[in-house]
Image (cartoon, coloured by chain):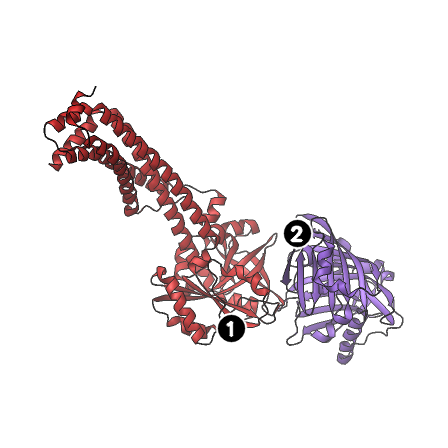
Chain colours: A purple, B red
Amino acid sequence: MTHPLLRSLSSALPPLLLLLAPATFAQDAGTPAVAAAPDKTQKLLEQIDERSRTFGDYRAVVQAEVKRASGKSRRQLQLYRRDTENKLVLLITAPKTEAGKGYLNAEENLWFYDATIGRWERRTAREAVGGTDGRPDDFDQTHWAKNFNATAAGQEKLGAVQTELIDLRAKDGAQVAYTQVKLWVDAKNGNVLKQQDFSENGKLLRTVLSPKWKKVHSPSKKGDFYYAEQTVIYDELEKENSTRFTVSQIDLRPLQPSVFTKGWLEARSR
Amino acid sequence: MWIRILMIAARNLGQRPGRTLLLGAVVAVVTAVLALLIGLAAGARSTVLTSRMALSSGHLNVVGFFKPTAGQISAIITDYQQVLEVVRKLPGLDHVVARGGGYVTVVSETRSEKKDLVGINLADEPLLAKTLRISSGELAALQSPGNLLLFEAQAEKLKVKVGDRVTLSSTTFRGSYNAVDVRVGAIAKDMGLEGNVTTFVDESTWRRLYLLNSRTTTLLQIYLQDPDRAPEAHAQLRAALEQAGHRLLPHEPAMAYWMKFDPLTQQDWTGQKLDLSTWMDEEGVLAWVFKGMNVLSGLLVTFLVLLISLGVSNTMWIAIQARTREIGALRALGMGRGSVMWMVLFEGLLLGLAGTLTGALLGWGIGTAINQAQIPLPIGAQLVLMSDHLQFQLHPLGVLGSAVLITGVLGFMSLFPALSAARLQPALAIAHT
């Protein structure tokens, strides 16, 4: 079953994890308190997006703990991003059976490299990455403001944390996996603590909890870059399925341009 | 004269009842085996084709592939009525069925399974209604929105029964996720591989899941009055659709439409293209299974026929050796070479005819008994044969053909000893010790 503490966040009950550990959320004294007026809500989305961008390169190690009805398994991935060019590489490094497989998202095409047969395949952005509950978008910079219209839905306490609740509806023609989304944004600092993704007809499909946020100074951005150090994604249809992602070893130094090529990904498995 | 020769040949066979019965029994067994093998292959092919035609393929199929961008592909025909107009003018057309398709996760309270989803309008599906064997619930449930048909193995895996609710989840053709709740309206008996991977839902629920309007479908299954005309009709329809301005994918024989997603995703074109295939193309891997089955049974039967032919021929040689003096006497009494040859040949033919007719009756009887016994098949065989029990299709002509073939071969093999007997010199033959 899912983690009882984190699971409780997705229910109407007081979220224990947040109640007990509000200090774990990154504080940003520079970010003003969130206002709920319609125009300001859209502004807030822009702020959230801006916080998720490095305006340069980004490298991290992602540990994934996958829970299924059949049992638990672990994955390790190397994440590479070049936010200015909307490029992303996800290289699976563990377990051994999966190592070398990877994804390349470049020029609005998602490619999957299967190292076991040495073949590239085009995939859709809805692909579940390496058998986890995460999609490529979950590892990338966010584009909430570009793709969604926001409506303030009031304030809600998530444990001890006061949050702004925002309803999002996809804009016409937006290429998004979930056309209806709810965000619980920390009113103090703009961290997205909880996200619920709904189907086109309003059925809850996923709950994403991100209780731990961190910030890193980005020289290319000349400001701070924010990332969720720990994220748990719950599948709300297949209730036994969930994945906990832990991000570490953040490195914002420039990457070689060759990293975002098929050749580089192929070379990792040789 | 012929009757007299025939009677002599029959009497010769009767003089050695042990040998005749043994050889006749061997011939009968081989004939029965041949008839059963032919019946098994025909039965399997017929079951598979009937099931396939009902579940997943028409005699001709028109599938739409739509690519909004080079990297995305959906199996849909936009404005399918325009395509339908062309199809309806096809000579020899019996009827057309429009079906929606997709790949869904079926989620029950305790389990989930990934399946091909087919959206149907039950009123347009007489063949499907005739082919499905409902074990629980009512097929008519699919006439109402929000009802799903599962096969027994699927229901068992999902741990659901008729009346239970499940959720269908999929990505829409726009790329976003959607889910609908449906009720298990009917459970059908398993039908092999197709039945294992396919589920059916009413058309309106399919549209609700994929957010599609009534002008869109996935597949047009076209049924012809004469299925054997499929290749000819395929060429005619291609020409007609091209003339009507539709873009078509090149014909790829022996490639089912679901096998085309990956290669087409790699291609750079965008927009709508139609793919035309025949039921033979859609047979795909199964065509190879049947070819393999035919080759194996052909080899087995050839070996057996060769074996009994050599046996009969050898027995004839021995008989002629033993009856050399008798043949010499017949020749001395005025029997011509031709009559001697026919006498020996008739022996072989009579033996063959009696054996093969007995074998044909034996094969027919065994096949009919097995059909009536409804002997269950193991899962592996069910997946290929699309049936949960062993089924022989015994056509009288097929069984009779087996008998004629083996009799003919035995006659041919008797020809050599017969010619040898005809060449015997009467004086030398009488002096033979």
User: Which quarter of the figure is the C terminus of chain B placed in?
Assistant: top left
Residue under the image location 23 percent in, 31 percent down: B420
- State left or right for residue B426 relative to residue A96: left
The numbered mark 1 sits on a residue in which chain? Answer: B
Query: Which residue, given by chain and number where applicable, does mark 2 sit on?
Result: A116
Residue under the image location 41 percent in, 71 percent down: B239
Residue under the image location 80 percent in, 72 percent down: A50
- State left or right for residue B3 relative to residue B200: left
Q: Nearer the viewer, residue B165 or B255?
A: B255
User: Which quarter of the figure is the N terminus of chain B placed in?
Assistant: top left
The amino acid type found where label 2 is placed reads: Thr
Q: Secondary structure at mark 1?
A: loop
- Quadrant location of residue B345? top left
- State left or right for residue A87 relative to residue B257: right
Residue A51 image offset from top left, x and y in percent: 81, 70
Residue B319 image offset from top left, x and y in percent: 24, 26
Residue that sits furthest to the top in the current view: B433
Query: Which residue, given by chain and number where applicable, does mark 1 sit on?
Result: B78
Rendered view: B424 above or below A47: above
Q: Nearer the viewer, residue A232 or B216?
A: B216
The numbered mark 2 sits on a residue in which chain? Answer: A
Residue that sits furthest to the bottom in the current view: A39
Residue B79 visible in the snapshot:
yes
Residue A246 image offset from top left, x and y in percent: 79, 57
Q: Residues within 10 Å of mark 2 (few under 14, many from 20)?
A: few
